[in-house]
Amino acid sequence: MPRTGFRLRQLLLASALSAMLSAPAYAVDAGKASRFYEDALARYQRRDYTGAVIQLKNALQQDRKMLAAQVLLGKSLLAVGDSVGAETAFNTAIELGVDRAEVELPLAQALYAQGRFTDLLARPLPTSLPNSVRQELLIVRGSAAGEINDARAARKAFDEARAIDPKAPTLVMAEASLALRQGNVARALELSQQAITLAPDRPEAWATRGAALAGQQQVQAAIDAFGRALSLDPRQTDARLARIDLLLDMNRDAEALRDLDALREFAPGDPRAAYRRGVIAARKGDTAGVAREMAEVVKAVDTMPQEIRSRRANVLLLGGMAHYSLHDGEKARVYFEAFLRLQPYHPGATRMLASAYLNDNDPVRAANLLEDYLRRAPGDAQAMTLLGSAYLVQKRYSKAAALLERAVMQGSADPTMRATFGASLAGQGLDVSGAQHLRAAFDANPGDQAVGASLGVLLLQRGDVKQALEVLERVYTANPRSPVALNLLGLARGRAGDRAGARKAYEAAVAVDARFTPAQLNLARLDVVEGRSDAARKRLQDLLRSQPDNPDALIDLAALDRAAGNADAARKGLEKAMAVAPRHPRAPLILIDEALAAGDNAGAAKIARAAVAAMPNDLSIVLALARAQLASGDLQRARETLIDARKRLEADPDALVQIARMQIAAGHLQGATYTVEKALALQPDAFAALELQAELALRSNDIGNAERLAKSLAEKYPTRAAGYQLQGDIALTKGQTANGLVLHKSGLDKEPSADNALRAFRACLAANQPARGVTLLQDYQRVSKQSDPRILMALAEGQIRAGDLKAARATLEQLQQRGPQPSGVLNNYALVLLQLGDAGALPAAERAWRSAPNDPQVVDTYGWILARNGQLDRALSYLRDARLRNPRDAEVRFHLAWVLAKQGRTKEAREELSPVVADLARDGMPAEARKLASELGL
């Protein structure tokens, strides 16, 4: 449950009689104290909690044992966020003899607000509480157990609370919040709706609903729910902050500013509001505004009582980021260190603390911190860069080079940190990654290899090869005998297309240090690129003689084995690489891709799960798991994996687009739309995101919006194909076939490429004009003078669909002459031969099956061709296998039913074919299937 999600209960005041039972031994102005108290009570009732605190303290100056004032003071302090003061007031009230039923619940809330969940749960549960209080207290305890991930204790507390009143709105809200914390968004949505039904006028219910909707990525609905909560109670600070975060994510800064202005009235001095104002200032490029808001955050956090600050992770994170942005490294370190004690291995805080250590010339502490972190998050490219810099300062050159190269190969830098409770400055424009600081430091001292190497790697990660090359040339000039500088220079030259320059740099690095592994590996890779496979193999074998467990050498040698057709040796090499380096992502990623290509989806998922267990924070591995889950048809788990990946990559617009495309494949259009909107909030003119936004509108059947977005894309990027292609898809959707195909051809003319030729071909197939598609591909081949194997595969498909089986056979044979082909090529070749009556169909099908024995389509083809060759018993085994692998494939079910009917097993055949007759009819039932259905009485 939210920490401020409890409604404070109105308590009965102590009677005048009880106040007289113990006369004070000091001067008391009872009348004055009473007047102060009554004024405080009135203020409390109209929610002027600050005024109530002042008047209650006045009352207690007149009568420090005034019990009613102590209780109400505790509640008022709790309302203004001073949970430590509230705890003191409630404990004083207990010492003064208050009934525990009056303060036990707000005292528990005070402990909860301080994050002292263990202390709260350690308090004995009083036995003589009224049921209503007992239930509320059980709910607080259940929520506290949830905060420390004690699911069993949470469930026990909620079960006991439910036994008292199963329809208590607070209980339902707390269970919804727990479900959301545990990632069960569907359950959270269900419970939050129950809360609304039970208590439609309670703002907390609507706030809970908003949180659940946000978890489901129903952004506008969440904004509306938080708005309803605020209309019922404008002082709901957490609901307002949550709405601000969503508005910022959607780039609706003007609306967010209105809410921030409201917080100046309802929560003046709240550092979370200042932080968000800093986000907006950063977006505007207002450096002075960022500094001003961060100074306000610092003032609020630094003056907060230590006993509160030390237990509140979000406050510590805020303080660290604010001090870091103000270049106060010493105080930033204190906050980040305290934060990491509460939340170890937080990516952003770890990286920023390491940066602070390096800035203070303490590479040993930086290295120790990052080494421990990277054991748990081996794919964090920014952490690799920082650790590489620490190693450079320590003159540990080989380790530094390997890490910096891995950071470059990782691709775009991992997203910078994001605060626990809102949009981070890093994600919204503040340069926390350090590029500006690195550039300034490097310009001031170009001879600093650590700074220059870090800057060069960062620029390569961002794709700015020209600037990276300029920086790394200067690093090399200042450090001409450094193998690290030479190796990074080789990488930059290679990225710039200068292979000769790259080789020269790598060879110079090896000349300086013959044992320098990164340059040896890069020379072998360059040999492969230049077609010198034998030279590459010799280099790698020489390297493995001295370093038999080098995972990169094992993986690169496996690639050469695979290219030479030695699949067994390649697999053994990859498996050894995984065994010697279980947290190295390259080998499992290759094995996952190979398993998926072979149709072994279960095997791919198994490898991915094992890799995620070893590298739970490596995003490439997590995304590979999602691909395996998609291939296995486990859409729900794939969606959950992708939502998690989006949260981890929410500051990287390019990665968000990739995730959104996978969400489309998972059938999660709403999630994909939200992900793309986040990408566009970060980078409004990002081409790939704009393209996908229009595609999503089309997929959602929002034709008008799709057309508007597609036209806008074509106008904004007139030399790119996508705008025309999307308009072509829209025209085809409208039944405007001729116009649609013309638009697709225009896209191909604007931007000739194999990908765009294939897209135009697919449009021809969608318009049921395969012959036109064949002509289009043949024209593209002739003009481009390229023979892309994807084009040949598509050409064969078009020829099959156009009924030109002899041409399809020739195209597929041309493909096979190029070397080993994917199982799909062999599969289609076998089917073409079958239709041509060629006896080569069966051996071709067997070759396809041997290359992909777990692919249901390949297995089905082999079984079907066996059946058509009269080998019914053998066929039955393969067809059952295919059916179990893909029971939703109507054609597979027909093939199995056909064999069963041929064997006289009519009942089984009927049971097999009956569920898919409608699917076969919808797709244009083949004559043989129609005949079999009739014979079976279907």
Image (cartoon, rainbow, N blue to C red):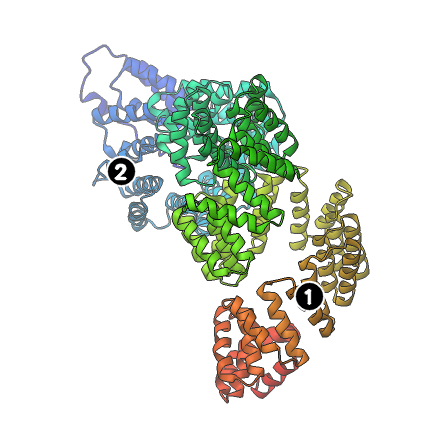
Q: Indicate which disc residue 284 carries.
A: none
Q: Which residue is mark 2?
A: 121
Is residue 904 visible in the rendered image? The answer is yes
With respect to residue 777, does 196 lie above or below? above
Residue 333 horizontal/vertical position (percent): 41, 23
Q: Which residue is mark 1?
A: 814
- Residue type at mark 1 is Gln
Residue beneath the point at 63% across and 27% down: 470
Q: Residues within 10 Å of mark 2 (few under 14, many from 20)?
A: some
**The residue positioned farthest toward the bottom in the image shown:** 904
- Secondary structure at badge 2 equals helix
- Residue type at mark 2 is Leu
Image quadrant of residue 24?
top left
Residue 245 horizontal/vertical position (percent): 53, 35
Q: Residues within 10 Å of mark 1 (few under 14, many from 20)?
A: some
Residue 480 horizontal/vertical position (percent): 56, 25
Q: Quadrant of the C terminus?
A: bottom right
With respect to residue 621, does 872 lie above or below? below
Q: Quadrant of the N terminus?
A: top left
